[in-house]
Amino acid sequence: MKKIIRITTISNSLCYLLKGQLKFMGQFYEMIGVSGQGESLELVRKNEDTRVHAVEMTRSITPFQDLIATYRLYKLFKKEQPFIVHTHTPKAGTLGMLAAKMAGVPHRVHTIAGLPLLEAQGVKRQLLDNVEKLTYACCTHVLPNSFELKRTIEKLKFTSNGKLKVIANGSSNGIDELHYDANKVSKEQKELLRNKLNIKNEDVVFIYLGRVVKDKGINELVSAFDQLSKEFQNSKLLIVGPREDDLDPISQESEIIITNNSQIIVPGAQSDIRPFVAISDVLAFPSYREGFPNVVLQASCMGLPCIVTDINGCNEIISDGENGIIIPPKDVKALLKAMKFMMENPKNRIKMSEGARQNIVDKYKQSLVWDELLKFYKSLE
Protein backbone atom coordinates (compact mmCIF):
# COMPACT_ATOMS: atom_id res chain seq x y z
CA MET A 1 0.00 0.00 0.00
CA LYS A 2 1.39 3.42 -0.97
CA LYS A 3 2.23 5.86 1.87
CA ILE A 4 0.96 9.41 2.34
CA ILE A 5 2.39 11.68 5.03
CA ARG A 6 0.14 14.55 6.18
CA ILE A 7 1.80 17.38 8.13
CA THR A 8 0.60 20.37 10.17
CA THR A 9 2.66 22.69 12.37
CA ILE A 10 0.80 21.96 15.62
CA SER A 11 -1.05 18.82 16.68
CA ASN A 12 -4.39 20.62 17.20
CA SER A 13 -4.57 21.36 13.47
CA LEU A 14 -3.96 17.73 12.55
CA CYS A 15 -6.52 16.58 15.10
CA TYR A 16 -9.35 19.03 14.54
CA LEU A 17 -8.93 20.79 11.16
CA LEU A 18 -8.54 17.45 9.35
CA LYS A 19 -10.78 15.41 11.66
CA GLY A 20 -11.81 12.09 10.11
CA GLN A 21 -9.88 12.63 6.89
CA LEU A 22 -6.82 10.50 7.69
CA LYS A 23 -9.04 7.61 8.79
CA PHE A 24 -11.03 7.81 5.54
CA MET A 25 -7.87 7.91 3.40
CA GLY A 26 -6.46 5.03 5.46
CA GLN A 27 -8.83 2.70 3.57
CA PHE A 28 -6.81 3.38 0.40
CA TYR A 29 -3.31 4.37 1.57
CA GLU A 30 -0.99 3.91 4.52
CA MET A 31 -1.34 7.23 6.32
CA ILE A 32 1.20 8.88 8.66
CA GLY A 33 0.37 12.05 10.60
CA VAL A 34 3.15 14.48 11.53
CA SER A 35 3.03 17.61 13.74
CA GLY A 36 4.58 19.13 16.81
CA GLN A 37 4.23 17.18 20.05
CA GLY A 38 1.01 17.62 22.02
CA GLU A 39 -1.94 15.76 23.54
CA SER A 40 -3.80 16.10 20.25
CA LEU A 41 -1.17 14.01 18.44
CA GLU A 42 -2.09 11.03 20.60
CA LEU A 43 -5.76 11.69 19.80
CA VAL A 44 -4.90 11.59 16.09
CA ARG A 45 -3.27 8.19 16.55
CA LYS A 46 -6.36 6.82 18.35
CA ASN A 47 -9.18 8.55 16.46
CA GLU A 48 -7.72 8.31 12.97
CA ASP A 49 -6.25 4.83 13.52
CA THR A 50 -2.96 5.97 11.99
CA ARG A 51 0.73 6.16 12.80
CA VAL A 52 1.95 9.54 14.07
CA HIS A 53 5.35 11.15 14.35
CA ALA A 54 6.31 14.29 16.33
CA VAL A 55 8.53 16.96 14.76
CA GLU A 56 8.64 20.25 16.63
CA MET A 57 7.95 23.33 14.47
CA THR A 58 7.46 26.94 15.56
CA ARG A 59 4.84 29.32 14.18
CA SER A 60 7.20 32.30 14.05
CA ILE A 61 10.47 33.08 12.23
CA THR A 62 13.13 30.93 13.99
CA PRO A 63 15.92 30.00 11.54
CA PHE A 64 17.87 27.64 13.84
CA GLN A 65 14.81 25.63 14.98
CA ASP A 66 13.51 25.61 11.39
CA LEU A 67 16.76 24.08 10.16
CA ILE A 68 16.56 21.31 12.77
CA ALA A 69 12.90 20.59 11.92
CA THR A 70 13.67 20.46 8.18
CA TYR A 71 16.48 17.95 8.78
CA ARG A 72 14.21 15.76 10.94
CA LEU A 73 11.49 15.80 8.29
CA TYR A 74 14.08 14.95 5.60
CA LYS A 75 15.28 11.96 7.65
CA LEU A 76 11.68 10.79 8.16
CA PHE A 77 10.91 11.00 4.42
CA LYS A 78 14.07 9.11 3.47
CA LYS A 79 13.13 6.36 5.93
CA GLU A 80 9.41 6.09 5.05
CA GLN A 81 9.68 6.71 1.28
CA PRO A 82 6.18 8.21 0.92
CA PHE A 83 4.39 8.48 -2.41
CA ILE A 84 2.89 11.86 -1.35
CA VAL A 85 3.78 14.41 1.31
CA HIS A 86 0.80 16.71 1.88
CA THR A 87 1.26 19.73 4.15
CA HIS A 88 -1.11 22.24 5.78
CA THR A 89 -0.41 25.50 7.72
CA PRO A 90 2.38 27.93 6.72
CA LYS A 91 5.42 26.68 8.64
CA ALA A 92 4.70 22.99 8.03
CA GLY A 93 4.26 23.85 4.36
CA THR A 94 7.62 25.58 3.99
CA LEU A 95 9.67 23.06 5.98
CA GLY A 96 7.74 20.01 4.78
CA MET A 97 7.92 20.90 1.08
CA LEU A 98 11.63 21.81 1.28
CA ALA A 99 12.47 18.54 3.08
CA ALA A 100 10.28 16.52 0.70
CA LYS A 101 12.01 18.00 -2.36
CA MET A 102 15.43 17.31 -0.85
CA ALA A 103 14.35 13.73 -0.06
CA GLY A 104 13.09 13.16 -3.61
CA VAL A 105 9.43 12.60 -2.69
CA PRO A 106 7.65 12.35 -6.08
CA HIS A 107 4.43 14.20 -5.19
CA ARG A 108 4.67 17.24 -2.92
CA VAL A 109 1.29 18.81 -2.14
CA HIS A 110 0.59 21.89 -0.04
CA THR A 111 -2.88 23.15 0.93
CA ILE A 112 -3.20 26.92 1.36
CA ALA A 113 -5.83 27.96 3.91
CA GLY A 114 -5.13 31.70 3.97
CA LEU A 115 -2.21 34.05 3.48
CA PRO A 116 -1.04 35.75 6.71
CA LEU A 117 1.44 37.77 4.60
CA LEU A 118 -1.44 39.87 3.19
CA GLU A 119 -1.51 41.81 6.48
CA ALA A 120 2.29 42.29 6.61
CA GLN A 121 4.16 45.35 5.33
CA GLY A 122 7.68 46.47 4.41
CA VAL A 123 10.63 44.14 4.97
CA LYS A 124 8.48 41.54 6.73
CA ARG A 125 6.14 41.38 3.71
CA GLN A 126 9.08 40.93 1.32
CA LEU A 127 10.46 38.14 3.49
CA LEU A 128 7.10 36.35 3.71
CA ASP A 129 6.54 36.73 -0.05
CA ASN A 130 9.91 35.07 -0.71
CA VAL A 131 9.19 32.25 1.77
CA GLU A 132 5.83 31.63 0.07
CA LYS A 133 7.48 31.51 -3.37
CA LEU A 134 10.11 29.08 -2.03
CA THR A 135 7.36 26.83 -0.60
CA TYR A 136 5.48 26.73 -3.91
CA ALA A 137 8.69 26.17 -5.86
CA CYS A 138 9.25 22.99 -3.82
CA CYS A 139 5.67 21.77 -4.45
CA THR A 140 4.43 19.72 -7.36
CA HIS A 141 0.82 20.77 -6.54
CA VAL A 142 -0.61 23.74 -4.61
CA LEU A 143 -4.20 23.42 -3.35
CA PRO A 144 -5.79 26.76 -2.35
CA ASN A 145 -8.90 25.94 -0.33
CA SER A 146 -11.05 28.57 -2.04
CA PHE A 147 -11.43 29.92 -5.58
CA GLU A 148 -10.81 33.52 -4.45
CA LEU A 149 -7.60 32.43 -2.74
CA LYS A 150 -6.51 30.77 -5.98
CA ARG A 151 -7.15 34.05 -7.83
CA THR A 152 -5.13 35.97 -5.20
CA ILE A 153 -2.16 33.60 -5.63
CA GLU A 154 -2.39 33.97 -9.41
CA LYS A 155 -2.48 37.76 -9.08
CA LEU A 156 0.60 37.73 -6.82
CA LYS A 157 2.37 35.42 -9.31
CA PHE A 158 3.69 33.15 -6.55
CA THR A 159 3.64 30.06 -8.80
CA SER A 160 2.63 28.81 -12.22
CA ASN A 161 -1.11 28.32 -12.75
CA GLY A 162 -0.49 24.70 -13.71
CA LYS A 163 0.34 23.84 -10.08
CA LEU A 164 -2.88 25.34 -8.66
CA LYS A 165 -6.06 23.34 -8.04
CA VAL A 166 -9.13 23.82 -5.80
CA ILE A 167 -10.59 20.57 -4.46
CA ALA A 168 -14.41 20.33 -4.93
CA ASN A 169 -16.04 23.71 -4.14
CA GLY A 170 -13.40 24.71 -1.59
CA SER A 171 -12.63 23.92 2.09
CA SER A 172 -9.81 21.76 3.46
CA ASN A 173 -12.02 19.19 5.15
CA GLY A 174 -15.63 19.99 4.31
CA ILE A 175 -18.32 20.02 6.97
CA ASP A 176 -19.72 17.10 8.95
CA GLU A 177 -23.37 18.03 8.43
CA LEU A 178 -24.57 15.30 10.80
CA HIS A 179 -22.50 16.79 13.64
CA TYR A 180 -23.25 20.47 12.95
CA ASP A 181 -27.00 20.15 13.20
CA ALA A 182 -28.98 22.49 15.49
CA ASN A 183 -31.39 19.63 16.26
CA LYS A 184 -28.55 17.80 18.04
CA VAL A 185 -28.72 20.38 20.88
CA SER A 186 -31.69 19.70 23.15
CA LYS A 187 -34.09 22.34 24.49
CA GLU A 188 -32.84 21.52 28.01
CA GLN A 189 -29.20 22.09 27.01
CA LYS A 190 -30.09 25.45 25.52
CA GLU A 191 -32.05 26.53 28.59
CA LEU A 192 -29.20 25.54 30.92
CA LEU A 193 -26.63 27.45 28.87
CA ARG A 194 -28.84 30.54 28.56
CA ASN A 195 -29.33 30.57 32.34
CA LYS A 196 -25.62 30.10 32.95
CA LEU A 197 -24.72 33.00 30.63
CA ASN A 198 -27.64 35.19 31.78
CA ILE A 199 -29.20 35.31 28.31
CA LYS A 200 -32.97 35.85 28.10
CA ASN A 201 -35.20 34.26 25.45
CA GLU A 202 -35.98 37.68 23.96
CA ASP A 203 -32.28 38.59 23.58
CA VAL A 204 -30.75 38.73 20.09
CA VAL A 205 -27.40 36.98 20.36
CA PHE A 206 -24.45 37.65 18.05
CA ILE A 207 -21.71 35.06 18.24
CA TYR A 208 -18.07 35.25 17.22
CA LEU A 209 -16.26 31.92 16.74
CA GLY A 210 -12.50 31.58 16.28
CA ARG A 211 -9.17 32.78 17.59
CA VAL A 212 -9.48 36.01 19.57
CA VAL A 213 -6.88 38.00 17.62
CA LYS A 214 -6.60 41.32 15.80
CA ASP A 215 -6.58 39.74 12.31
CA LYS A 216 -10.03 38.24 12.89
CA GLY A 217 -11.53 41.74 13.26
CA ILE A 218 -12.14 41.50 17.01
CA ASN A 219 -11.29 45.19 17.57
CA GLU A 220 -13.90 46.26 15.01
CA LEU A 221 -16.45 43.79 16.35
CA VAL A 222 -16.08 44.92 19.96
CA SER A 223 -16.24 48.60 18.95
CA ALA A 224 -19.35 48.10 16.77
CA PHE A 225 -21.13 46.01 19.38
CA ASP A 226 -20.32 48.48 22.16
CA GLN A 227 -22.21 51.14 20.17
CA LEU A 228 -25.03 48.72 19.30
CA SER A 229 -25.54 47.63 22.91
CA LYS A 230 -26.21 51.22 24.03
CA GLU A 231 -29.19 51.35 21.67
CA PHE A 232 -30.40 47.76 22.09
CA GLN A 233 -30.48 46.49 25.66
CA ASN A 234 -31.61 43.06 24.39
CA SER A 235 -28.44 42.53 22.32
CA LYS A 236 -25.70 40.15 23.45
CA LEU A 237 -22.29 39.24 22.02
CA LEU A 238 -20.66 35.86 22.68
CA ILE A 239 -16.93 35.65 21.98
CA VAL A 240 -16.09 31.95 21.74
CA GLY A 241 -12.50 30.87 21.03
CA PRO A 242 -8.92 30.73 22.30
CA ARG A 243 -6.75 33.80 22.83
CA GLU A 244 -3.33 34.24 21.18
CA ASP A 245 -1.98 37.29 22.97
CA ASP A 246 1.62 36.40 22.17
CA LEU A 247 1.09 36.22 18.39
CA ASP A 248 -1.60 38.76 17.48
CA PRO A 249 -3.10 40.56 20.49
CA ILE A 250 -6.27 42.65 20.37
CA SER A 251 -6.09 46.34 21.40
CA GLN A 252 -6.09 47.57 24.97
CA GLU A 253 -9.20 49.60 24.12
CA SER A 254 -11.01 46.39 23.16
CA GLU A 255 -9.90 44.73 26.39
CA ILE A 256 -11.41 47.59 28.40
CA ILE A 257 -14.72 47.44 26.47
CA ILE A 258 -14.96 43.66 26.96
CA THR A 259 -14.35 44.07 30.70
CA ASN A 260 -16.85 46.92 31.16
CA ASN A 261 -19.70 45.94 28.82
CA SER A 262 -21.98 43.47 30.60
CA GLN A 263 -23.67 42.56 27.30
CA ILE A 264 -20.39 41.04 26.04
CA ILE A 265 -19.91 37.46 27.27
CA VAL A 266 -16.59 35.63 26.83
CA PRO A 267 -16.90 31.86 27.36
CA GLY A 268 -13.42 31.36 25.82
CA ALA A 269 -12.28 28.21 23.99
CA GLN A 270 -14.80 25.36 23.87
CA SER A 271 -14.42 21.71 22.88
CA ASP A 272 -17.99 21.75 21.51
CA ILE A 273 -19.26 25.02 20.02
CA ARG A 274 -22.69 23.65 19.05
CA PRO A 275 -24.63 24.64 22.22
CA PHE A 276 -23.30 28.21 21.89
CA VAL A 277 -24.28 28.41 18.22
CA ALA A 278 -27.70 26.90 19.04
CA ILE A 279 -28.55 29.75 21.45
CA SER A 280 -27.30 32.42 19.01
CA ASP A 281 -29.08 34.29 16.22
CA VAL A 282 -26.27 35.64 14.03
CA LEU A 283 -22.58 34.85 13.41
CA ALA A 284 -20.47 38.02 13.32
CA PHE A 285 -17.13 37.24 11.67
CA PRO A 286 -15.35 40.42 10.48
CA SER A 287 -12.01 38.74 9.63
CA TYR A 288 -9.30 40.55 7.62
CA ARG A 289 -8.16 37.43 5.74
CA GLU A 290 -9.17 33.80 5.39
CA GLY A 291 -8.63 30.76 3.26
CA PHE A 292 -11.95 29.01 3.67
CA PRO A 293 -13.37 29.69 7.15
CA ASN A 294 -14.64 26.61 8.96
CA VAL A 295 -16.62 28.68 11.49
CA VAL A 296 -18.76 30.19 8.72
CA LEU A 297 -19.45 26.67 7.42
CA GLN A 298 -20.28 25.45 10.92
CA ALA A 299 -22.57 28.34 11.88
CA SER A 300 -24.35 28.29 8.50
CA CYS A 301 -24.81 24.53 8.73
CA MET A 302 -26.56 25.11 12.08
CA GLY A 303 -28.87 27.65 10.44
CA LEU A 304 -27.31 30.97 11.42
CA PRO A 305 -27.21 33.93 9.03
CA CYS A 306 -23.67 35.33 8.95
CA ILE A 307 -22.20 38.83 8.84
CA VAL A 308 -18.85 38.38 7.09
CA THR A 309 -16.24 40.53 5.39
CA ASP A 310 -15.78 40.68 1.62
CA ILE A 311 -12.71 38.44 1.58
CA ASN A 312 -11.98 35.11 -0.07
CA GLY A 313 -13.77 32.13 1.40
CA CYS A 314 -16.34 34.21 3.27
CA ASN A 315 -17.72 35.74 0.07
CA GLU A 316 -17.98 32.28 -1.49
CA ILE A 317 -20.00 30.73 1.34
CA ILE A 318 -22.23 33.77 1.96
CA SER A 319 -24.42 35.43 -0.69
CA ASP A 320 -25.25 38.98 0.39
CA GLY A 321 -28.89 39.30 1.44
CA GLU A 322 -29.59 35.59 1.00
CA ASN A 323 -27.85 33.76 3.85
CA GLY A 324 -26.09 36.72 5.44
CA ILE A 325 -24.60 40.17 4.92
CA ILE A 326 -21.21 40.94 3.37
CA ILE A 327 -19.35 44.07 4.55
CA PRO A 328 -15.93 45.61 3.79
CA PRO A 329 -13.10 44.51 6.13
CA LYS A 330 -11.90 46.87 8.90
CA ASP A 331 -15.10 48.93 8.65
CA VAL A 332 -16.75 49.54 12.05
CA LYS A 333 -19.58 51.61 10.57
CA ALA A 334 -20.54 48.93 8.03
CA LEU A 335 -20.39 46.25 10.72
CA LEU A 336 -22.58 48.32 13.07
CA LYS A 337 -25.08 48.93 10.24
CA ALA A 338 -25.27 45.19 9.47
CA MET A 339 -25.76 44.31 13.15
CA LYS A 340 -28.48 46.98 13.48
CA PHE A 341 -30.23 45.52 10.42
CA MET A 342 -30.26 42.09 12.08
CA MET A 343 -31.70 43.62 15.27
CA GLU A 344 -34.40 45.67 13.53
CA ASN A 345 -35.47 43.15 10.87
CA PRO A 346 -36.23 39.81 12.55
CA LYS A 347 -38.24 38.58 9.53
CA ASN A 348 -35.29 39.15 7.19
CA ARG A 349 -32.96 37.55 9.70
CA ILE A 350 -35.14 34.44 9.94
CA LYS A 351 -35.52 34.29 6.16
CA MET A 352 -31.71 34.36 5.76
CA SER A 353 -31.40 31.51 8.24
CA GLU A 354 -33.86 29.24 6.42
CA GLY A 355 -31.70 28.37 3.40
CA ALA A 356 -28.36 28.57 5.22
CA ARG A 357 -28.01 24.89 6.11
CA GLN A 358 -29.06 23.42 2.76
CA ASN A 359 -26.58 25.62 0.89
CA ILE A 360 -23.73 24.21 3.01
CA VAL A 361 -24.86 20.57 2.75
CA ASP A 362 -25.20 20.83 -1.05
CA LYS A 363 -21.76 22.34 -1.67
CA TYR A 364 -19.44 21.51 1.22
CA LYS A 365 -20.43 18.29 2.97
CA GLN A 366 -17.43 16.28 4.10
CA SER A 367 -18.00 13.24 1.92
CA LEU A 368 -17.90 15.43 -1.20
CA VAL A 369 -14.56 17.04 -0.26
CA TRP A 370 -13.00 13.70 0.79
CA ASP A 371 -14.08 11.95 -2.40
CA GLU A 372 -12.65 14.72 -4.57
CA LEU A 373 -9.34 14.70 -2.65
CA LEU A 374 -9.17 10.91 -3.03
CA LYS A 375 -9.69 11.28 -6.79
CA PHE A 376 -6.84 13.80 -6.84
CA TYR A 377 -4.53 11.38 -4.96
CA LYS A 378 -5.52 8.54 -7.31
CA SER A 379 -4.71 10.72 -10.32
CA LEU A 380 -1.09 10.89 -9.08
CA GLU A 381 -0.59 7.11 -9.08
Image (tube, helix red, strand yellow):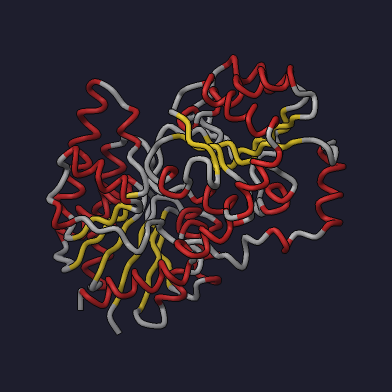
The x, y position of residue 292, in whole percent, is 41, 49
The x, y position of residue 146, in whole percent, is 35, 51
Does residue 369 appear in the picture of this structure?
A: yes
Q: Quadrant of residue 210?
A: top right
> Which quarter of the rendering shows the N terminus?
bottom left
Left or right for 16, reference 291:
right
Q: Residue at x 19, y 49 (%)?
A: 136
Give the vertical position of 34 relative to 94 (above or below): below
The x, y position of residue 328, in whole percent, is 43, 28
Left or right for 76, reference 11:
left
46 or 351, which is in the foreground? 351
149 or 201, which is in the foreground? 201
Q: Residue at x 41, y 78 (%)?
A: 26
The x, y position of residue 79, in whole percent, is 25, 71
> Which quarter of the rendering shows the C terminus?
bottom left
Q: Residue at x 35, y 70 (%)?
A: 372
Left or right for 284, reference 53:
right
